[in-house]
Image: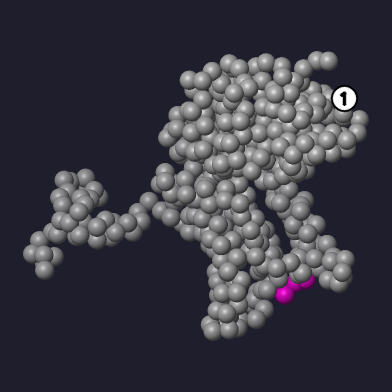
Amino acid sequence: MSQAEIGLIGLGVMGANLALNIAEKGNRIAVFNRTVETTRKFYAEAGELQGQIVPCETIEEFVAAIRPPRPIIIMIKAGEAVDQQMEALKPHLARGDIMIDAGNANFRDTMRRFDALKDTGLTFIGMGVSGGEEGARHGPSIMVGGTAESYARVEKVLTSIAAKYESDPCVAWLGENGAGHFVKTIHNGIEYADMQMIAEIYGILRDGLKMTANEIGQVFGAWNRGRLNSYLIEITEKVLKASDPLTGNPMVDMILDKAGQKGTGKWSAIEAQNMGVPATAIEAAVAARSISSMKDEREAAEKILGVPSVGELAVADRDAFIKDLENALLAAKIGAYAQGFSVMAAASGEFNWSLPMPTIAKIWRAGCIIRSQFLDEITSAFTKAPDAANLIVTPAFAAMVKETDGALRRVVSTAVLGGLPVPALASALGYFDSYRRGRGTANLIQAQRDFFGAHGFDRLDGADSHHGPWGSGLNA
């Protein structure tokens, strides 16, 4: 019997779905799970795909079943478990074999693992896989970091299983070591921001305009047929229109308002801060999830502080305001993506990756959570201006910001006056206002810092500056 083209360890939901996708696309795959019964169950339920699957019950059997150089996908919980699995594999591998971490790993762990294998004859790929369970089974967006040679070994398999956008596979080699996992991290950070902004718009419609979940779902459905067309808007409509089978009430109204997080959004915010790149929408979204988890504290605070008693928002033209909400969401979305791409550009220089921005936008157009028609426009913008300092100064997006930021300003001010929290929307507005202002207020901050005596400053007129307090009046 012929050897498998690739192997996979870890038959949890994501691993099992990815393995079935690989087999379905005509690739022979060896599979192994620490629990033998899980492997047997997976194989028994694979149906007509069994002929493409080699179930293995020992590491030795598993490694022997794969054609050298052996690419082995590790699909287990991120962190120490991956290191332990790698150590267990290493004695059984040969020169040129490739270990592939396809989980939500911290890119710094990926870089460490890549470097640790440099002189061993083995190599490592950090592979970001986006699209959740559905994407893993039917076509994810795949972001690869590793050597060009190791990518060449797995390119055919990955191209076959990736999501397709107008026949273009949503997979790409993005650079060495941690490049793939870094891009996946920023993808998730943008996803956090996008979801938070949608939730804030929902809050305005629910609490400000007193609309029902079904009515709000209809609004999102209409938006999904326009410029906001995207997977997240599509599922928002479906979620809002769904009914609870137990009570008949809207399902969304039965769900506790506490959002979980797995850490990738936080990593995005931390790395942005490390590189000195503003990613305020991502930061606001991460903070909002943290506040949402403080349910008991929020309820206690409401009893002490109360909430603003504005009632229904006083909008003169309801339809016009809903149109403003649509444009405000588009503007804020532009801000979030601009920040995410700016962080990736900074990391590209920091880690010598040469990240291809148009390619990243292209492989996000299908398969991943943030897929949308909007990414076609980002692809075009970066293709025409690959060295643009920021997405929002490219001609197409500069025009969009000018067209929609007025709506964002009106929505944020209306929400704030109505006591409705809109941290991510407000952060996007603040980002636009700060970024496009040639003369800001940091001169005062620099003057304050200089007064402490520890720093110098740059003069507006270009003359030489000096350190410390300036003159007798400030020496007191």
Q: Position of residue 30 (x, y in %)?
A: 76, 26
* 73 or 411: nearer the viewer: 73
* 313 or 154: nearer the viewer: 154
Magenta region, main secondary structure: loop
Point 73% across, 25% down: residue: 62
Q: Is residue 464 left or right of residue 300?
A: left
Q: Is residue 414 visible?
A: no
Q: Is residue 252 left or right of residue 353?
A: right
Point 66% across, 23% down: residue: 71
> Given the current orientation, which residue lies at the most extreme left position?
472
Q: Position of residue 450 (x, y in %)?
A: 21, 56
Amino acid type at circle 1 is Gly
Q: Is residue 312 above or below residue 360?
A: below
Q: Is residue 202 visible?
A: yes
Q: Quadrant of the C terminus?
A: bottom left
Q: Position of residue 69 (x, y in %)?
A: 65, 17
Q: Is residue 186 above or below residue 237?
A: above
Q: Is residue 210 magenta?
A: yes
Q: Quadrant of the N terminus?
A: top right
The residue tagged 1 is: 51
* 129 or 280: nearer the viewer: 129
Q: Is residue 144 magenta?
A: no
The quadrant in which residue 447 appears is: bottom left
Q: Is residue 25 above or below residue 206?
A: above
Q: Position of residue 122 (x, y in %)?
A: 56, 21
Q: Is residue 142 above or below residue 289?
A: above
* 435 or 423: nearer the viewer: 423
Q: Which residues are magenta?
A: 209-213
Mark 1 lies on a secondary structure that is helix
The quadrant in which residue 367 appears is: top right
Q: Neighbour class for label 1 at 10 Å: few (<14), some, many (≥20)?
A: few
Point 43% across, 49% down: residue: 273
